Amino acid sequence: MDDGISTGRLLVATPQLADPNFRRSVVLIVEHEPEGGTLGVVLNRPTQVPVDQILPPWSELVTGPSVVFQGGPVALDSALALAQVPGTDEPLGWRALNGSPAVARVGLVDLDVPPEILAPEVARLRVFAGYAGWGTGQLQSEIDEGAWYVLSAESGDVFAEDPDGLWPAVLRRQGGELAFVATFPEDPSLN
């Protein structure tokens, strides 16, 4: 575990984090400016809303489950998308996340670009409603208080086929104490 907040890293909620917006969440940091704050998307909050109800032109490119994910509590009426593209080119309408090599070739999609322009370039795509945001120093303060683990991402995390199992899976692969945390009950009073 490393407290190095940077683009492409994961914020994994500790069991102590009781905020319902982030309980057992796994957040991918998509932008981090030490003097300007941090922006991320929650990777493990699929909704029941199909992408074709919100962004019909993009629905054919979406990696299953083909629903909109709740990216966080901020700006729920806006959408952003992440896509993985093969190769080394930077296609029009796609901006790479600078950060962890494990999420190489994952980037933000400009949803105003016609999807047919990006379609041949996209290997996987996921749409998020809203995002998570922290002001300067706020996230570090939450980490210091024990709310978050800052961990390395793996390429499959962003497009996990089983998003509901992502929180324990990320913790288990860390080994040691964090693997044990993965078994922490949802409601400790029932233990």
Image (tube, grey):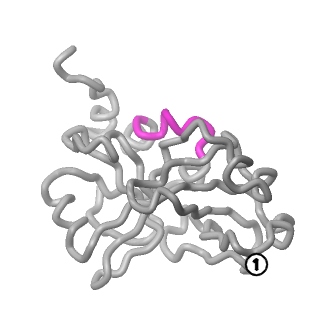
Which residue ends up furthest to the left in the rendered image?
145
Q: Which residue is mark 1?
A: 91
Task: Determine if residue 89 is in view.
Answer: no
Which segment did they paint magenta? Answer: 160-168
Magenta stretch, main secondary structure, is: helix
- Residue 101: quarter of image: bottom right
Three-letter amino acid code at disc 1?
Pro
Camera-side residue of 107 and 177: 107
Task: Please indicate whether residue 7 sits to the left or right of residue 85 in the image.
Answer: left
Is 167 a magenta residue?
yes
Task: Determine if residue 168 is in view.
Answer: yes
Q: Residue at x 47, y 66 (%)?
A: 8
Q: Which percent across, then down, holds residue 167?
A: 41, 39
Is 59 a magenta residue?
no
Q: Residue at x 25, y 44 (%)?
A: 19
Q: Which percent across, then down, holds residue 142?
A: 19, 59
